[in-house]
Structure formats: structure tokens, C-alpha cells
Image (cartoon, rainbow, N blue to C red):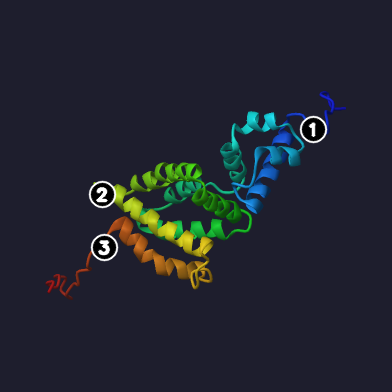
């Protein structure tokens, strides 16, 4: 028997109730969009008191963030990518990670919903902007030597954001239909240029080992 009893069919506060709220919220946000969902409607569908949602998540934005955290966290994924290998391979590895997460039928839709809602809601957009600046641009800038590291990191992020926008929001062809290898081949040079700069010219060497003078 439930110690708290049952009141008007509502679930008492418990880990199961919190999970039920998140399940309902995630589905509703994905189906209806950010603006159409209210805490009251989520509480009604989850079978709990409105005050309990406020207790767990604080606000609609808190609920939104918690619901989408069930998928993939771009900042955490980026941290894993940049810790595995040298700077020269970061562009390719980042692109492949982005495609793997955003193309995935489980982790992709919450990210797309978050992006759409950030465009529609100014306050939420400001939160997403701050998260991108602090958790993504600043982290990439920490990898790049030189005084222009911040500019290079921002340019790198802009190229990745363009890929996400054209492939998942605009669904622009042929970007939507490109394979991961095709995307890497197309965007890899741009990302490398943004992050590292132009490649230095290779000096040819004569058979006797002396370098050939540059023209």
C-alpha cells in the first residue's frame, strides 16, 4: 500500500513521478513546441500536482532543459571529442560526432526541438547562446594557440552551426542526403582553415637532400 494514499488520482512525489513528468514533457515539447506546452497541461497528463513540477524543475525552462537532457548534451560530447587526439583531427571528429548524434532517431529530435524553440523564444535563445559561448566556443578556443583563438573558435562553431541549420532545420538538398564521409570531405577543409589556418606549403627536396628554392 502507498503510505501517502491517493488524492484525486494524483501521484505522490517520488522518483517515478519525476520520471513520468519528464516523459510527458519531452513528448509534448517535441510534438507541440515550446510555447504551446504549459506546466499545468504537463501536470494534468502526468497525474501530479502543479506544485510538484515547480518543486522539481522550478520553471518551464527548467522542465524543458531537464526533459531534453535525456538525450545528448552537445557540450559533454564535444569535451569527449577534443580529449581524443590532436588538434589536426578535431574538425573531422567533431563533424562525425555531430552527424552521429543529430542523425540518431533518439538523440536527434530533442536537439532539433531545442534549436527550434530557441529560435522562437528570445529568453530561451539567450540561454542557448550563453551555453554555446561558454561550453563550446570557449572550450574550442582553449585548444587553439595564439591571440586570435577566440575568433578561430567562433568561426569553427559558425561552420558547424551552418551544417546543423541546413541539414536539420532547412533540410536543404543535397546536404540532407550526404553521407558522413561526404560531409567531412566538403566541410573538413573549411573547419581546418578556421581552426588552424592555411596549410604551410610543402618544400620539395632535391635528390641530394637540398631543398628546392621556392618560386
Percent position (x, y) of residue 152?
31, 53
Q: Earlier in the sequence, mark 2 or mark 1?
A: 1
SS at badge 1: loop
Query: Looking at the figure, which quarter contains the N terminus?
Result: top right
Report the Cα–Cα distance between label 2 and label 1: 56 Å
- Image: 8 above or below 201: above
Percent position (x, y) of residue 64?
59, 42
User: Residue at point 73% right, 35% down?
Assistant: 17
Q: Which residue is mark 1?
A: 10
SS at badge 3: loop
- Image: 173 above or below 119: below
Report the Cα–Cα distance between label 3 and label 2: 14 Å
Q: Which residue is mark 3?
A: 198
Report the Cα–Cα distance between label 1 and label 3: 62 Å
Q: Is residue 1 left or right of residue 38?
A: right
Closer mark to the observer between disc 3 and disc 2: 2
Q: Is there CB contact under 8 Å for labels 1 and 3?
A: no
Q: Which residue is mark 2?
A: 148
- Image: 7 above or below 41: above
Q: Earlier in the sequence, mark 1 or mark 3?
A: 1
User: Residue at point 71% right, 37% down?
Assistant: 43
Amino acid at each position: 500500500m502507498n503510505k501517502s494514499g491517493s488524492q484525486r488520482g494524483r501521484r505522490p512525489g517520488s522518483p517515478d513521478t519525476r520520471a513520468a513528468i519528464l516523459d510527458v514533457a519531452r513528448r509534448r515539447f517535441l510534438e507541440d513546441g515550446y510555447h504551446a506546452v504549459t506546466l499545468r497541461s504537463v501536470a494534468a497528463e502526468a497525474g501530479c500536482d502543479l506544485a510538484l513540477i515547480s518543486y522539481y524543475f522550478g520553471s518551464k525552462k527548467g522542465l524543458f532543459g531537464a526533459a531534453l537532457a535525456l538525450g545528448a548534451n552537445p557540450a559533454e560530447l564535444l569535451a569527449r571529442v577534443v580529449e581524443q587526439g590532436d588538434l589536426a583531427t578535431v574538425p573531422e571528429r567533431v563533424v562525425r560526432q555531430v552527424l552521429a548524434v543529430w542523425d540518431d532517431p533518439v538523440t536527434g529530435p530533442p536537439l532539433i526541438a531545442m534549436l527550434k524553440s530557441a529560435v522562437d523564444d528570445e529568453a530561451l535563445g539567450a540561454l542557448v547562446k550563453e551555453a554555446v559561448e561558454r561550453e563550446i566556443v570557449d572550450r574550442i578556443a582553449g585548444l587553439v594557440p595564439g591571440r586570435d583563438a577566440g575568433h578561430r573558435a567562433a568561426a569553427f562553431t559558425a561552420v558547424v552551426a551552418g551544417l546543423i541549420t541546413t541539414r536539420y532545420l532547412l533540410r536543404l538538398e543535397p546536404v540532407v542526403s550526404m553521407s558522413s564521409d561526404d560531409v567531412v570531405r566538403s566541410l573538413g577543409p573549411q573547419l581546418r582553415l578556421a581552426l588552424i589556418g592555411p596549410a604551410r606549403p610543402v618544400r620539395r627536396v632535391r635528390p641530394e637532400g637540398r631543398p628546392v628554392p621556392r618560386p
